[in-house]
Amino acid sequence: MMKKIIYMMLTVTLTGLSSCESYLDVLPDDKITNETFWTSSDDAKLALNGVYSVLRNNFVYGYGGGYDACTPNAYQWAHWEGKQKQVGNGTITSGIGGIVSNRWKYCYGGIYRANYFLENVDKIPNMDAAAKEVMLGEVYFLRALFYDLLVRSYGGVPLILKTITPEEGRKVSRASAEDIWKQVRQDFDEAIKRLPKNSSDNGRATLGAALGMKMKTYMYTSEWDNVLEYCDKIDALNKYKLFPTYYGLFQYENEGNAETLFALSFMDGVFQQGSIFDRYWQPQNLKYGIDGSNSVAPTQLLVDEYETLDGSPVDRNDPYKNRDPRLDFTILRPGAYFQGQLYPTEIKNHTGQKVGFGIRKYTIETMPVVGRQSPLDFMILRYGDVLLCRAEAMIELNKDIDGAIDLINRIRTERKDVKMPPVKKGVGQAEARKALRHERRIELALEGQFWDDIKRWNAGPEYYPCDVFGALGEKLETKFPNGYNVKKDNVLPIPDSEISLNNNLKQNEGY
C-alpha cells in the first residue's frame, strides 16, 4: 500500500515552491539528509512548508469547488480529469485512478512528511522554544487534515504515526473509522494547545482553524453537542464574522478577511504555484487570455435551487430575473457579463461540447492570470459555514429551532448584497432541516462542501438518480441511474494499486 509513497518520500522528501517569501521557501531536493539537515530553525521552516505544500495538490484540497462535480451541483465535462465525473455518476471503480488512487497517495505523502518532521525537529540545537511549539502545532494540524480527508473518503484506513520502511508499509492493516476519527481529534487537540490566535501569513494554521476543523469532524459523525461546544470556542475568540458582501468575499483584494478560518494560500504564475481554478473552469479566449477548459460546469439542478427575491415562482420566460443574488455571484449563465463581455455560452469546451453554464466563484475577473495560475486563495473553512453548522446542530438536537432559523436568516439577510426573504419561524424539526440543507447548498455552492454533506446526511437516495441538464437544455447524463447505495457510495474504493502491494488491505464493500 505505501510502497510508492515511501519510495517517493525517501528520494524526494520535501519538494514544492520557491519564492522570495520565507513562508513559501522550500527544501532543495539534494539537501535532504540527516547529515546536512535539521541543523537550524530555517531547516524546520523549510520542512514545515513541505508539509503545507501537499494541501494544494488537486486531489487533496487543490481542486476546490471542482469536487461539486461529484454531486448534482456540477458536471465534469472531461472524463479523464480526476474522475470526479465517475464519482458523481456512480461508475467509479477501484482501478480507475484519478481521485481514487491520488487522494490516498498524496494524503499519505503529507502524513509521511508530518511524521518526518515530528521525529526530527528535536535534533535542531538551540531552537527557540516558542517558535518550535507553534511549528509543532501546525504539523499536528496538518496531519489531522490528511487523516480527516482519508477517513471521509475511504472510511477506515491504515493509521501510521511514524516513518516506516517499504517492507513495513506492505504489512499495515486498516484501522477502524472510529480509531481514525479519534486520532484526528487528538492531533487537533495537540494543535489547539500550541497554535496562536493570529498569524501574519494567509494559509497558516491558527487556533481558530484548529477549533473549526475539529468542529467539522463532529459534524461528520453527528456529535451535535460537541459541534455546539466548538462553535462556542470559535466565537469566544471574538475574531470571526461574516464578510459584508458575498461577492467581495471571493475577491483577491479581500483575502484573509475576518470570515476566513482556514484557506489554501496560492501565488501567481510566476512561481507556478497558483490556483488552477481559472484554468479548469473558465471558457477560452476571454478578455485576459485565459486558456480555460470549462472542465467543470454548474448544472440546471443547482440553478433551480436559487430562490427569487420575493419568494414568487421563477419566471420561465425570464428565468434569471428576480433571483437570489448569490446565483450571479456564483454561476456564469446565459446573459451574464464576465470580464466586460457577454459570457460565451455557445463556446465549446476542449472536449467539443457546448458549455452553457460556467463558474464565477473563485475565478479572477479584474486582473490578468499569469501562466494560467491564479493567486486567489481558496477558503477551506469560513464563518458562514460555522454559523450553518451551529444551526444544524441545534436543529438535529431539536432544541431552539427558532434560534437555528435566526442563524440561517443571518446568512440570508446580513450581507449588503444578499437580502433574501427570512425563513419563517415556528416550524418543526423536519421543515427546519430542509431549510438548513437548502441554505448550505446555496451559500456554499461550488466550494467543495456539498459532496461531504450528502454523504454525512446519508442523503444520496434523496438526490439520486437525477438527470443533469446544462444551460442550453441539453441532457448531459443521469447520475446514479441505478440508485445510490449509501453503504457503498458514501466512500471511495481502496485503490487496486495499493491492495496489490499489501494483502492486509481489505476492499470496501461493493467494489
Image (cartoon, helix red, strand yellow):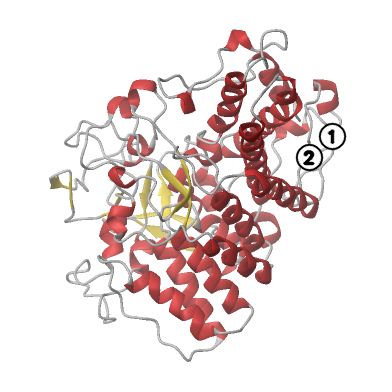
Instruction: State left or right for residue 186 relative to residue 266.
Output: right
How many C-alpha atoms fall within 10 Å of the one at disc 1: few (<14), some, or many (≥20)?
A: some
Q: Are marks 1 and 2 in contact (CB under 8 Å)?
A: yes
**Callout 1: SS:** loop
First along the sequence among labels 1 and 2: 2
Residue, disc 1: 172
- In front here: 239 or 430? 239
Q: Which mark is residue 371?
A: none
Amino acid on which the number 2 mark rests in the picture: Pro
Residue 324, given in percent of the width and then of the height, sits at 28, 69
Name the residue located 48 percent from the left edge and 41 percent from the top edge.
199
- In front here: 406 or 446? 406
User: From the image, which quarter does the N terminus lie in?
Assistant: top right
Residue 38, given in percent of the width and then of the height, sits at 68, 17
Residue 189 in view here: yes
How many C-alpha atoms fall within 10 Å of the one at disc 2: few (<14), some, or many (≥20)?
A: many
Residue 233, given in percent of the width and then of the height, sits at 59, 62
